[in-house]
Image (cartoon, rainbow, N blue to C red):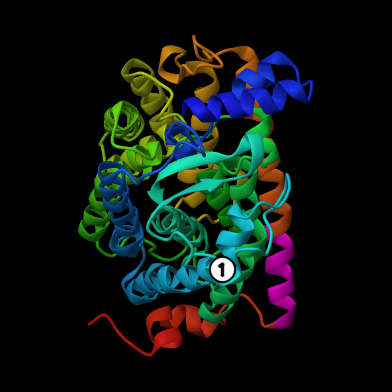
Amino acid sequence: MRAIARAVAKREITRGIVPWAGRAAALLPALLLAAPASAQDAATVSAGDTAWMLTSTALVLMMTIPGLALFYAGMVRKKNVLATMMQSFFLAALVSVVWMVAGYSLAFGEGGAYVGDFSRLFLAGIAEGWDGPFTLGSGDGAVAFTIPETVFIMFQMTFAIITPALATGAMADRLKFSSLCVFTVLWSLLIYSPICHWVWHPNGWIFGLGALDFAGGTVVHINAGVAGLVGALVLGKRTGLGSENMAPFNLALAVIGAGLLWVGWFGFNAGSAGAAGGRAGMAMLVTQLAAAAAALAWAAAEWITKGKPSVLGAISGAVAGLVAITPAAGFVLPGAALVIGVIAGLAGFWGATALKHWCGYDDSLDAFGVHGICGIAGALLTGIFAYGPLSATPASPNGIAGSFGQFMLQLYAVLATMAFTAIGTFIILKAIDVVMGLRVSEESEREGLDVSLHGERLG
């Protein structure tokens, strides 16, 4: 971390960038915060850091399978349960291969400010130094790690897996499986990888701007939420919405899924510290507090407005809090986490109920209402609640405290992510619709996707 701060500060100052940008860029997002002394000094792999990152990687993968698979499956109708679980399970396999073939190279290849390059296609070069530390970037901006690159690749792969899987929640019950597969491949390469490069590679323009995203507020949640919303608008509403019973088939499955998401999120956020240290401990603590506060806030909102707190509301609230704390986890203190959680619970409740009703779109499982809205809230609140001493570096001994200037940087990053994702997702979906169609037939939709797409029944 000390070397990163020195390298970034030197690079930005020599380029003549204004002082605040140099200081802000020293607060690098996600794994980059945890790099050791320098690219030259990193001589050995840390067994402790590697063990923690291997554990975190498994926890994040668990978030998609079985966590998200159960969470989403419990909220659809019985005739679509298997098809919904299949989406999460199959995307875990599909994106793994896409990430190995080209996704990692486009996200973490040197490239330029906007995308990586083709130097790591099929993970070229992984045989060289596979059991030692590695560096990301080159020259003064190089970032060194005390974990093997294989662990870094796997950890980032789990993020690439869950992002398009989250977006499927907005398009549930009506999207063709073949079209989903094509969409996922194109979207992962053309949308996810470039945004990942922007935010988490030393050459990325948002990275250089100084906007903070500790574990994926922009890269994962805003990205997935906006993509889901665009997908819902392009596909149109589910057949029978408003006239047929759309109640969840089995909320018990959703509760189990939400629980797995909650536990897995410790790998998502605390793992993004990149090392087994104090920052990971703080990230884990604030993650727990934000999730708890948001669950209580959503339940309270339902209690007040509807007379009863629902199970679905409580688990949705917890996920909303987890989403909102993601970009802030390595930068804020417990008190701020409680505030972020309460705001997320209320914002998620509003996004999943009032906003959806007012705008008239059919976000089936509230992918935008929870991940989009709360991802935006969390990213912006990071600029307000960032705690200086927690983010202190040699380049900025007092750290970067929350400020209006940092808030504006966060807003800029949020708007850029939303615009790029919305436009890119729309183009991809419309192209697929022209070539092969996006939506199942009305007959297939009424029969249920389990039978019409996969030839199976739940029982």
Q: Compared to 254, does 400 lie above or below?
A: above
Q: What residue sits right under mark 1 in the picture? A: 124
x, y percentage for residue 12? Answer: 70, 25
Q: Nearer the viewer, residue 248 or 158?
A: 158
Residue at position x 51%, y 85% in the image: 443
Name the image quarter holding the C terminus. Answer: bottom left
Answer with left or right where residue 115 lies relative to residue 260: right
Answer with left or right where residue 287 lies relative to residue 161: left
- The answer to whether residue 208 of the structure is visible from this angle is yes
x, y percentage for residue 100? Answer: 51, 69
Q: Is residue 341 magenta?
A: no
- The answer to whether residue 352 of the structure is visible from this angle is no
Residue at position x 30%, y 26% in the image: 278
x, y percentage for residue 441? Answer: 57, 82
* Extent of the magenta region: 425-435
x, y percentage for residue 252? Answer: 20, 57
Q: Nearer the viewer, residue 367 or 336?
A: 336
Q: Is residue 428 magenta?
A: yes
Q: Main secondary structure of the magenta part?
A: helix
Q: Quadrant of residue 323?
A: top left
Circle 1 SS class: loop
- Alpha-carbon neighbours of circle 1 within 10 Å: few (<14), some, or many (≥20)? few
Q: Compared to 211, does 103 lie above or below?
A: below
Q: Quadrant of residue 83?
A: bottom left
Q: Nearer the viewer, residue 442 or 295?
A: 295
Check disc 1 and give the amino acid type. Answer: Ala
